[in-house]
Amino acid sequence: MPERIVYVSRLVRLPLLGADGADVGRIVDVVVGLGGAPPRVIGFVVAVQRRRVFVGVGRVSEVDPTGVRLRRGSINMRQFEVRSGERLVDRELLGQRLRDRRVVDIGIAVSPEPFAWEVATVALGSGRLLGLRHAPEILDWSEAGELFADPGPTARQAATLDRLHPAEMAAELRALPLTRRRVLAEALEDERLADLLEELDEDEQVRLVEGLDHERLARVLEEMEADDAADLLGELPDRRRDELLGAMDPGEAAPVRRLLTYAADTAGGLMTPEPVILGPQATVADALARLRDHDLPVPLAAQVFVARPPFETPTGRFLGVAGFQRLLREAPGKALGRCIDELDVLAPRDSDRRVAERLAAYDIVALPVCDEAGRLLGAVTIDDVLDRMLPTDWRVSGLER
């Protein structure tokens, strides 16, 4: 690999300097060409006041961690537009999946040609969110060649969707014809398609997945929250629902099967069977470590449910709840059994209205659901109650406002 490598994540937001050292603008992205060996850097997108303009790499004399310096002259102030055969590194390539990991950075280096730069390395990181929580794996660009292949219009549009928040992704898809929506859904990764489906109502979900084969849809269902997967399966014909449950991993299918035994408008039908559960001997530090998991939905990260073993639902006897704010005030080594608050629990057959009333009365974001033996079955979170109580078209009308 070349010795002198500049990583794009450290280059963006650095200054573009004129030949005289004057500050011209700020680097916001790097443009690379597709299909090259290695892929070449075509130029830089620069923010100048309120405009984004293109500066070709041939106009640049130096690129280093302090910024980019022009060789001479001024720059063209025409608004930048990406062209066919080009990709934006920060906006389009970072975050892409490669080898079941995420691209977290791309390194560029001086090319043997004069005034030219090329892609040298690709950094891969783990986790659903971007960032360097752990040391990245550094690959030579040749080991990630598929990242720089021209993907075609469908893959490009799917990659653009993949960069959006799931709610924004859902809004973009709603504006497209159904046939196009299905094509793009097929092109998305299982995890991202699961995120998208969780932002759609059941009717939209059914229309979108009608063309997916059982094996693919089963994998997507495994990536969804169990309660969302159960809601979708509950809308499908009995035969297809049974086939999909049979195709899912048994461990992933088991909580979904339990949820399907409850009516959709009950606490059992609304609950998630996978809240954060710890025993009374676990410490405050243990609880906070679990709540820091970046994959944990926000409503579930607000509290720990304390129960006797086993700690997977249905648990042993439910003891109480330790709220996040309470945990922050306690010593790290204190046992959770000394930090719990007792709450009235919901029964799985309680109506959705009673669930909403209890959440409002306690002014909290989640309530436990227990069986007659006092075992924790799951938790109902406020977002699921709002989904149930609001009009069916609230997602569309809410975004339009």
Image (cartoon, rainbow, N blue to C red):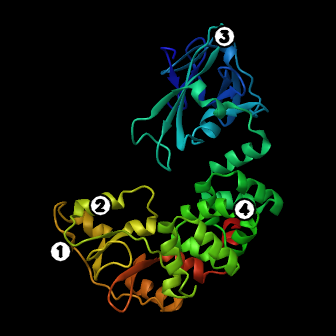
Q: Residue at x 59, y 29 (%)?
A: 27
Q: Tell me which amino acid carries mark 1.
A: Arg
Q: Earlier in the sequence, mark 2 or mark 3?
A: 3
Residue in the foreground of this view, choosing between 2 and 63: 2
Measure how far apart labels 1 and 3 are at the Cα level. 70 Å
Can you tell which of label 2 and label 3 is closer to the viewer? 2
Measure how far apart labels 1 and 2 are at the Cα level. 15 Å
Can you tell which of label 4 and label 2 is closer to the viewer? 4
- Give the SS element for disc 1: helix
Measure how far apart labels 2 and 3 are at the Cα level. 55 Å
Residue in the foreground of this view, choosing between 277 and 114: 277
- Give the SS element for disc 4: loop
Q: Tell me which amino acid carries mark 4.
A: Leu
* Residue bearing the label numbered 3: 72
- Give the SS element for disc 3: loop
Q: Tell me which amino acid carries mark 2.
A: Leu
The reply to whether residue 236 is in sight is: no
* Residue bearing the label numbered 1: 338
* Residue 305 as seen in the image, left or right of residue 97: left
Mark 1 and 2 residues: CB-CB less than 8 Å, in contact? Answer: no
* Residue bearing the label numbered 2: 288
The label number, if any, that marks residue 66 in the structure image: none
- Give the SS element for disc 2: helix
Above-or-below relation of 331 to 75: below
Above-or-below relation of 81 to 303: above
* Residue 383 as seen in the image, left or right of residue 280: right
Q: Earlier in the sequence, mark 1 or mark 2?
A: 2
Q: Earlier in the sequence, mark 1 or mark 4?
A: 4
* Residue bearing the label numbered 4: 212
